[in-house]
Amino acid sequence: MSCSTWTYGQMCIMQCQKGYDVPASIYGEFVCGKSDGKWRPNDHVPDCNGKSQ
């Protein structure tokens, strides 16, 4: 995860090691708002997928 703080909380982008991809079923961005402290779209970060050859 690569995260940065912004005015309304924290934003993180999922990153995978070489040879792996972010799952196609998710957008790859996670946001945590200061007002409620909850991660969106949810607090579960899936595993990276192996790239198909």
Image (cartoon, rainbow, N blue to C red):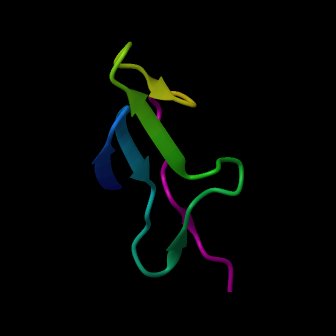
**Main secondary structure type of the part rendered in magenta:** loop
The answer to if 44 sits in the magenta stretch is yes
Q: Residue at x 41, y 20 (%)?
A: 38
Q: Residue at x 71, y 48 (%)?
A: 25
Which residue extends farthest top? 36
Relative to 22, 18 lies left or right: left
Total marks placed:
0
Residue 44: give x, y in percent of width and height: 47, 32
Residue 2: give x, y in percent of width and height: 33, 58
The answer to if 35 sits in the magenta stretch is no
Quadrant assignment, res 50: bottom right
Quadrant assignment, res 8: top left
Which residue extends farthest front? 7
In this view, the residue in front, 26 or 12, is 12
Report whether residue 39 is seen: yes
Q: Residue at x 44, y 67 (%)?
A: 16
Quadrant placement of the N terminus = bottom left
Residue 29: give x, y in percent of width and height: 52, 48
Q: Residue at x 37, y 15 (%)?
A: 35
In this view, the residue in front, 33 or 22, is 33
- Magenta residues span 43-53
Relative to 53, 40 lies left or right: left
Which residue extends farthest bottom? 53
Q: Is residue 16 above or below residue 9?
A: below
Relative to 3, 24 lies left or right: right
Residue 12: give x, y in percent of width and height: 40, 49
In this view, the residue in front, 29 or 45, is 29
Quadrant placement of the C terminus = bottom right
Report whether residue 46 is seen: no
